[in-house]
Amino acid sequence: MTLACTPYDSDNQALLTRPESNSQAGLAPLLLTVVELVRQLLEAQIIRRMEKGVLSESDLDRAAESIQKLQEQVLHLCEIFEVEPEELNVHLGEFGTLLPEAGSYYPGKEGVKPSVLELVDRLLNTGVVVEGNVDLGLAQLDLIHLKLRLVLTSQPV
C-alpha cells in the first residue's frame, strides 16, 4: 500500500476545517455558521423591505428586535462552545467567503468582496427555480430518492 502526500498550502484553508477551533465543540460551529448565515439573510431582507417602504414602523421595530436577539443568542452560544464568532465565516478560496466582512455588504449595493450571503440575497431578491433529482445513500446503496422543485424567492408565490 502506497500513501501519496499532498503538500499543504497554508494560503488555501480546507473548507470547514479550522485547526484553531475548539475541537470539543463538535457540530456546534457548523450549526452556528448556518444560523448566522440565515440571520444575515433575514437582516438583508428586512433592509430591502424597509427601503421599499413595505414595513410599518411596528413591523420594523419587531424585526430589528428579533434580529438583535438572534445575534445575541449566536454570540452567547459561541461563548458556551468556546468558538470565536470570526470562525463562523468560512473562506472559500477564489469564491470569497460565506459571510461578508462587517460593513462590506449592503443589500442592493455591490459588495467589495464576494460572499455566498451576497449571492443568496440577490437570488432571493430576483427569484430562481431549481429542479432535479437527488439520490441519497450510504455504502453504495441508494436509500432515499428525491424529485425536487424548489422556488427560491423573497416575494410571495
Image: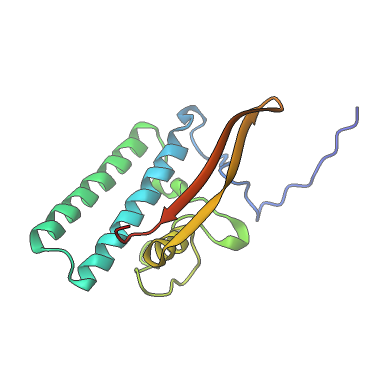
Rendered image quadrant of residue 51: bottom left
Rendered image quadrant of residue 83: top left
Nearest the viewer among 46 and 152 is 152
Rendered image quadrant of residue 11: bottom right
Q: Is residue 89 left or right of residue 10?
A: left
Residue found 85% across the figure and 38% down from its top: 4
Residue closest to the far right: 1
State whether residue 84 appears in this view: no
Q: Is residue 36 left or right of residue 21?
A: left
On screen, residue 62 above or below 83:
below
* Total marks placed: 0
Residue found 67% across the figure and 51% down from its top: 10
Classify the position of the C terminus by image quarter. Answer: bottom left
- Residue 120's x, y, as percent? 44, 59
- Residue 133's x, y, as percent? 59, 44
Q: In this view, does 39 lie to the left or right of 140?
A: left
Residue found 51% across the figure and 54% down from its top: 130
On screen, residue 138 above or below 111:
above
- Residue 33's x, y, as percent? 43, 44
Nearest the viewer among 26 and 135 is 135
On screen, residue 19 above or below 62:
above
Q: Which colour scheme is used?
A: rainbow
Q: In this view, does 16 lie to the left or right of 38?
A: right
Residue found 69% across the figure and 24% down from its top: 139
Nearest the viewer among 85 and 108 is 108
Residue closest to the far bottom: 109
Classify the position of the N terminus by image quarter. Answer: top right
- Residue 21's x, y, as percent? 50, 38
State whether residue 44 appears in this view: yes
Nearest the viewer among 137 and 18 is 137
